[in-house]
Amino acid sequence: MSYGESFARLRAAAPDWDAYTRHGFVEGLRDGSLPRAEYLAYLVQDYLFLIQFSRAWALAVVKAGDLDELRACAATVHTLLDHEMALHVQTCAAAGIDTAAMLATPEAVTNIAYTRYVLDAGLSGDFLDLLAALMPCVLGYGEIGLRLAAEAAPDTPYRDWIDTYAGAEYQQACRDAGALLDRAIRKRLGDAPQDSPRWNALTDRFATATRLEAAFWDLGRA
């Protein structure tokens, strides 16, 4: 798995990366031990999360510096709205939770904190600030999906979730997002971004978003 050099550097500088990608919730998906009620509660909150996350990627369209960046961000909005959210709708509908019920569910405080942090990164910062806040979710789920596809128990009831994030469409979206991050950083910070005065601020953005991601898994247990 490789989503680009910039992601690898930011990931290595995020102290909570393992706490996020190997959280007990994730391991419950892997071995099938996660209670179904916790999974459904998470899916409802994640559905609400993806609405705000799509807005953040739409903001990236506005913040983009050229047409290639604009197209890449617009394609990600499409993936979120027309592919990823379908898992949530279908799974919850099968459990008797329709879209109207999901939309009527109050956003959890942790959900609000995370999504508004990402939006604020884009509103108060530039394109790189926004990408640094967005990437832990996009690329972290891709990493988790691939690992669980290889390690999950054959009878885990969460194969549909795993297949979504390990699947070809989502993995291509991850590779495209990683390439976008590499190009955007190289364009603005040059070939040695770690030597730029901006680098520490970007790693802080990425690390904070990673910490918020780790906390998000606990929503199913609220």
Image: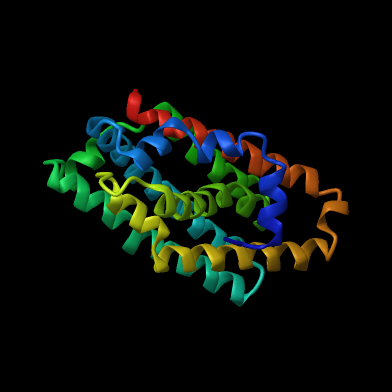
Above or below for 17 versus 180:
above
Residue lying at 58% horizontally and 37% vertically, measured from the top left: 18
Q: Quadrant of the C terminus?
A: top left
Above or below for 13 versus 179:
above
Give the x, y percent position of residue 76. 47, 64
Quarter assignment of residue 65: bottom right
Residue 91 vs residue 204, the one in the foreground: 91
In the picture, measured across the screen, residue 29 lies left or right of residue 211, that is: left
Coloration mode: rainbow
Q: Quadrant of the N terminus?
A: bottom right
Residue 153 vs residue 174, the one in the foreground: 153
Give the x, y percent position of residue 218. 41, 28
Quarter assignment of residue 156: top left
Residue lying at 56% horizontally and 50% vertically, measured from the top left: 134
Above or below for 2 versus 204:
below
Residue lying at 85% horizontally and 60% vertically, measured from the top left: 192
Give the x, y percent position of residue 45. 33, 38
In the picture, measured across the screen, residue 158 lies left or right of residue 60, that is: left
